[in-house]
């Protein structure tokens, strides 16, 4: 028997008069796919006003059987504590404030500590914050701000990623700031969500731009700024959002005659190393269309192939010089990294030169 468990956030159904109608709609869609349907429903932000020891589906069961009298469907009632264990009573709430503001968020302590080891150590200890059930976060440029704390609280309470602006560049700024705050508070579940959100924004705007500017290799990086790269460099090495910003630059770096972040590759060694890693990944997925002299590499962002040996913006000797100029200066701290990068850069240049020997 195939079973389906549905967790439904009914906060979006404020206009619905009866929740059982929602269950009927689900069943209409799933009637021919599943033999047993278990539906959990709850209200965000209003659950504490409801005193429900169990999630009763009796009304929904009657409504459902009225529509499908011959359909054998199993119904289950599950204790709230098994689904929403962090939500148990008002004594479990803590308050999160922001320095020099009147803003204060009330959030279930167990839920907050479940998401963040930082807050878990704070509120499950003998600290003053644990006794007062309140803490005030000090503002930190690029990390803790009104917007980043607000987005973090929305995510913890509702599991939704929400920003105040629709401007692409500002959204990326807010996303990086939230990622740094999540790293600061050790909220690991946010990392992949933020990265996926930024990736979707880049793809959406890139697809819109391709309708007017097909072939523009700078579409991925149009809304990314040097401030974004510098701020993201404070994220730990290997962070998915930091790698995403580097991967967005791969095609532009390989093909654009005037690479947008030329200066950043010299002044920000962490970005240069991320970029080299993403270039290697793109070249590992390249395709040689023999006997034709066409070589393609896979774009890490949209996973589409682009030409490597097109005449537009590509010159091997110029690229060889560029590889040398972007590498960090020789210092005791990064000498070993420079040696590895120089070796890898020269190897890439040799590969490009070999590809260019065959012409149309």
Image (cartoon, rainbow, N blue to C red):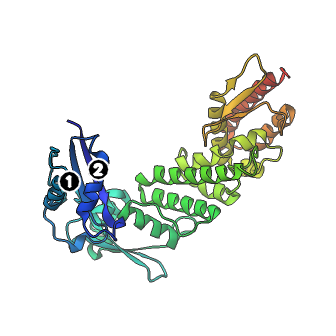
Pick the residue in front: 49 or 122. Answer: 49
Mark carried by residue 67 = 1
Residue 78 versus residue 32 in the image, above or below: below
Circle 1 — which element?
Answer: helix
Pinpoint residue 167: horizontal percent, then vertical percent. Answer: 62, 65
Q: Which of the two discs, 2 and 1, labels the residue nearer the N terminus?
A: 2
Pick the residue in front: 167 or 270. Answer: 167
Mark carried by residue 98 = none
The quarter of the displayed image where residue 11 is located: bottom left
Quadrant assignment for the N terminus: top left
- Taking the spot 62% from the left edge, 28% from the top edge, the residue there is 285
Quadrant assignment for the C terminus: top right
Number of marks in picture: 2
Q: CA distance from mark 2 to mark 1?
A: 9 Å
Pick the residue in front: 231 or 62. Answer: 62
Q: Residue furthest top?
A: 291
Seen in the image, is 256 located left or right of residue 250? right
Residue 9 versus residue 136 in the image, above or below: above
Mark carried by residue 28 = 2
Pinpoint residue 196: horizontal percent, then vertical percent. Answer: 51, 50
Circles 2 and 1: CB atoms closer than 8 Å: yes
């Amino acid at each position: 028997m195939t079973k389906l468990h549905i967790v439904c956030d009914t906060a979006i159904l404020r206009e619905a008069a009866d929740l059982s109608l929602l269950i009927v709609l689900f069943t209409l869609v799933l009637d021919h796919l599943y033999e047993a349907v278990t539906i959990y429903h709850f209200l965000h932000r209003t659950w504490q006003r409801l005193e429900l020891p169990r999630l009763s589906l009796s009304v929904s069961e009657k409504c459902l059987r009225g529509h499908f009298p011959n359909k054998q469907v199993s119904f289950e009632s599950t204790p709230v504590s098994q689904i929403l264990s962090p939500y148990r009573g008002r004594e479990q709430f803590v308050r999160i404030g922001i320095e020099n503001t009147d803003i204060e968020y009330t959030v279930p302590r167990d839920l907050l500590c479940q998401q963040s080891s930082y807050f878990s150590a704070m509120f499950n200890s003998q600290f003053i914050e644990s006794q007062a059930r309140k803490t005030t976060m000090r503002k930190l440029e690029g990390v803790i701000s009104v917007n980043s704390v607000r987005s973090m609280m929305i995510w913890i309470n509702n599991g939704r990623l929400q920003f105040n602006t629709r401007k692409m560049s500002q959204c990326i700024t807010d996303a990086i700031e939230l990622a740094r705050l999540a790293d600061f508070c050790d909220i690991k579940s946010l990392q992949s969500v933020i990265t996926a959100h930024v990736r979707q924004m880049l793809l959406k705007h890139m697809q819109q731009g391709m309708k007017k500017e097909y072939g523009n290799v700078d579409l991925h990086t149009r809304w990314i700024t040097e401030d974004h790269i510098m701020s993201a460099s404070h994220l730990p090495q290997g962070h998915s959002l930091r790698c995403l910003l580097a991967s967005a630059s791969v095609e532009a770096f390989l093909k654009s005659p005037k690479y947008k972040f030329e200066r950043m590759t010299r002044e920000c060694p962490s970005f240069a190393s991320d970029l080299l890693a993403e270039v290697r990944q793109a070249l590992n997925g390249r395709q040689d269309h023999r006997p034709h002299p066409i070589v393609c590499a896979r774009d890490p962002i949209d996973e589409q192939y682009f030409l490597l040996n097109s005449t537009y913006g590509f010159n091997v000797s110029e690229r060889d010089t560029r590889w040398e100029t972007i590498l960090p200066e020789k210092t005791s701290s990064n000498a070993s990294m420079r040696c590895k990068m120089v070796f890898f850069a020269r190897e890439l240049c040799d590969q490009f030169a070999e590809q260019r020997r065959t012409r149309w």
